[in-house]
C-alpha cells in the first residue's frame, strides 16, 4: 500500500512574505479542507529557531478557530541551514553539505507521515526569498532535495530580475535545473477572484464580444492605487520602483487578459499562448507616453525620501502612468492607460473599459451636467470586488435631464455568504494540483520585460525626473495631462 505525503518547504520562513502571505494561505487551505491529508509544512531559514519558536512566530498571523490553528501548527516544523554559494562544488563539499540536512529532514518527515506504508513524497519548495539567492538555492534543491518517489515543484516570486537581461540570466540558470512544468512563477494578481473572472466574463457572455474592439472602445484604463507608502520596505522598493513592482507584472498581466483573443481551449498553455501574443504586439513604451511621480510630504504622511530605508536623493518613481498600444487588428490605436501609485488618496484596483461616444447623439445638447458621459465597463478587483457598467439614463422626474448611473454587481451583496479566497490560497492549491494556468510562463516574462526595459534603462540613467505629489493626493498633475491627451474622458459619477 502506498501513501502520498506532501511537504511544502517554505524557504525564508522567518521573512515578511512567509509570515504575511505563505503561511496564512497554507492555513486557509487546511481550514477549508483543501489540503491533501498528510501534508507537512517545513520552514527553512538561517536564523536558529525550533519547531516551537517558529510556531509561536506564525501563530498570530493565522486567522481561524483556535483548535484548527493548533492542529495546523502541529504539522509545521523548522529546519535551520544556509542557502549556499553560487558554486555547486563548494556547496557539495562544505561540511555539512548545504541543504543536506534539509533533504534528510524532508525524507524523515515523509517517512513519519507515511505511518509504515510505502510513501510517495510530493515536494513543493516555496522560495520566499530575495532573488539574489535563487541560483544557489535552486542548485542545492536540485542536488539534495528532489523527491525520489513523487513530483518536485518550485514556487518563485517576483522580482524576476530587473530588466530583460538580468531576468533572462536568472531564468537561464534556473531552467538548466528544472523544466518549465516544475516552475511556478507567482504573480499574485492572477490569483484574485476578479482577475480569474475576466476569461469567463469575456468568453461566456454573448453581449460583450461584439463590442470588444477598436470600433467601440475608446480606451482601457488599468489602475492601481494604494493609500500608503513604502512602510519600511523602502530598501527593496527603491531598487525597483513602481514600474517593476506593479506595472510590468501585475497590471500587464491584467492587460493581457483584457486584450487577448479567445483561446482555442481552456488549457493553461492555450490561454498563455494568447496572452503572449498580446505582449508581443505591444511596442516598447515610449518615454513620451510616461508620467512619473514620487510622493512628498502631504496630508497622508511623510515623504518617500523621509523613509529611513530609502537612499538620500533617490529618484525612484512611486507613481507611474504609461500609455501602451497593442498593435493588432483588434486594438490598433486604442490607448491602454496603465496607472499605479503609492501614497495616493485611495485604495483601489480597477479595469475601466471606456466606450466611444454615441454616434449621431440625440442628446448632444444635454450633456450630463455639462459634460459628455461615456459608457464604461468597470471591473473592480479591490476593495469591494464588483463589475459594473456606467450608462446614461433619464433622471427620474418630470424633466428630461440625463444622469449617469450604474448597472452593478457587488460581490459582497450578491455572494454574501461565499467568502472570496485569498490569491495566495488559490495559487498554492493550483500548484498542488499541477495547474499552471495562473502562473507566468518564461516567454511571457521575456515579452513583458521587452516592453519596459528601454524605458527603465532611460529612467535609471536619470533621463526622467519624477514629479513630486503630496502623500494622500491624486498623484502628479502631469499624469492627468497625459491621460487627457489620449482622448480619455473623465466620467462623472452620478
Ligand atoms: C506586491 C507589491 O507585489 O503587491 C507591493 O510588491 C504591493 O508593493 C502589493 O503593495 C499589492 O498587492 P495587493 O494584493 O495588496 O493589492
Image (cartoon, grey):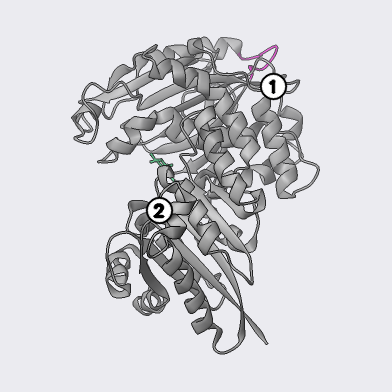
In front: label 1 or label 2:
2
Q: Is residue 332 left or right of residue 298?
A: right
Q: Is residue 269 left or right of residue 36?
A: right
Residue 129's spot in the image, x, y percent?
A: 40, 50
Residue 487 in the image: above or below residue 471: above
Residue 229 in the image: above or below residue 220: below
Residue 221's spot in the image, x, y percent?
A: 54, 26
Residue 44 in the image: above or below residue 370: below
Residue shown at the point (48%, 18%) measured from the top left: 455
Q: Is residue 469 left or right of residue 173?
A: left
**Main secondary structure along the magenta-highlighted residues:** loop
Q: Quadrant of residue 468?
A: top left
The tag on residue 331 is 1
Q: Is residue 394 visible?
A: no
Q: Is mark 2 within 8 Å of ligand 1?
A: no
Q: Is residue 269 magenta?
A: no
Which segment did they paint magenta? 356-363
User: What is the tally of numbered marks visible in this picture?
Assistant: 2
Residue shown at the point (73%, 23%) measured from the top left: 330
Whichever of callouts 1 and 2 sits on the residue coming sooner in the sequence is 2
Residue 202's spot in the image, x, y percent?
A: 70, 39
User: Which residue corresponds to mark 2?
Assistant: 84
Amino acid at each position: 500500500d502506498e501513501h502520498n505525503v506532501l511537504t511544502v518547504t517554505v524557504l525564508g520562513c522567518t521573512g515578511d512574505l512567509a509570515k504575511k502571505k505563505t503561511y496564512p494561505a497554507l492555513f486557509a487551505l487546511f481550514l477549508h479542507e483543501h489540503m491533501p491529508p498528510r501534508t507537512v509544512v517545513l520552514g527553512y531559514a538561517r536564523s536558529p529557531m525550533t519547531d516551537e519558536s517558529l510556531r509561536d512566530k506564525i501563530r498570530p498571523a493565522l486567522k481561524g478557530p483556535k483548535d484548527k490553528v493548533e492542529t495546523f501548527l502541529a504539522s509545521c516544523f523548522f529546519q535551520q541551514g544556509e542557502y549556499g554559494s553560487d558554486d555547486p562544488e563548494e556547496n557539495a563539499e562544505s561540511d555539512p553539505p548545504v541543504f543536506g540536512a534539509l533533504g534528510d529532514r524532508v525524507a524523515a518527515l515523509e517517512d513519519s507521515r507515511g505511518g509504515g506504508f510505502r510513501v510517495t513524497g510530493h515536494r513543493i519548495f516555496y522560495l520566499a526569498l530575495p532573488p539574489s539567492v535563487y541560483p544557489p538555492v535552486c542548485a542545492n534543491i536540485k542536488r539534495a532535495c528532489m523527491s525520489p518517489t513523487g513530483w518536485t515543484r518550485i514556487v518563485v516570486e517576483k522580482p524576476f530580475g530587473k530588466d530583460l537581461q538580468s531576468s533572462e540570466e536568472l531564468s537561464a540558470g534556473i531552467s538548466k535545473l528544472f523544466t518549465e512544468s516544475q516552475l511556478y512563477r507567482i504573480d499574485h494578481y492572477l490569483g484574485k477572484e476578479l482577475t480569474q473572472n475576466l476569461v469567463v466574463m469575456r468568453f461566456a457572455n454573448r453581449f460583450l464580444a461584439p463590442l470588444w474592439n477598436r470600433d467601440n472602445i475608446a480606451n482601457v484604463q488599468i489602475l492601481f492605487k494604494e493609500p500608503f507608502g513604502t512602510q519600511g520596505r523602502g530598501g527593496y522598493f527603491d531598487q525597483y520602483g513602481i514600474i517593476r513592482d506593479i506595472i510590468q507584472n501585475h497590471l500587464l498581466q491584467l492587460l493581457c487578459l483584457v486584450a487577448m483573443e479567445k483561446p482555442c481551449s481552456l488549457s493553461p498553455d492555450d490561454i498563455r499562448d494568447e496572452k503572449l501574443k498580446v505582449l508581443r504586439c505591444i511596442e516598447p513604451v515610449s518615454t513620451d507616453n510616461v508620467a512619473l511621480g514620487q510622493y512628498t510630504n502631504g496630508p497622508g504622511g511623510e515623504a518617500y525620501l523621509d523613509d529611513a530605508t530609502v537612499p538620500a536623493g533617490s529618484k525612484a518613481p512611486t507613481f507611474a502612468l504609461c500609455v501602451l498600444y497593442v498593435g493588432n487588428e483588434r486594438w490598433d490605436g486604442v490607448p491602454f492607460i496603465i496607472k499605479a501609485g503609492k501614497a495616493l488618496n485611495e485604495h483601489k484596483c480597477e479595469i475601466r473599459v471606456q466606450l466611444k461616444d454615441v454616434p449621431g447623439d440625440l442628446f448632444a445638447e444635454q450633456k450630463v451636467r455639462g459634460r459628455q458621459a461615456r459608457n464604461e465597463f468597470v471591473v473592480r478587483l479591490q476593495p469591494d470586488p464588483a463589475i459594473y457598467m456606467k450608462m446614461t439614463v433619464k433622471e427620474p422626474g418630470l424633466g428630461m435631464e440625463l444622469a449617469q448611473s450604474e448597472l452593478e454587481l457587488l460581490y459582497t451583496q450578491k455572494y454574501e455568504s461565499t467568502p472570496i479566497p485569498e490569491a495566495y490560497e488559490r495559487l498554492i492549491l493550483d500548484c498542488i494540483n499541477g495547474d499552471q494556468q495562473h502562473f507566468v510562463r518564461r516567454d511571457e516574462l521575456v515579452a513583458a520585460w521587452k516592453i519596459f526595459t528601454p524605458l527603465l534603462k532611460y529612467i535609471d540613467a536619470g533621463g526622467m525626473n519624477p514629479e513630486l505629489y503630496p502623500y494622500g493626493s491624486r498623484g502628479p498633475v502631469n499624469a492627468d495631462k497625459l491621460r487627457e491627451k489620449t482622448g480619455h474622458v473623465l466620467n462623472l459619477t452620478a
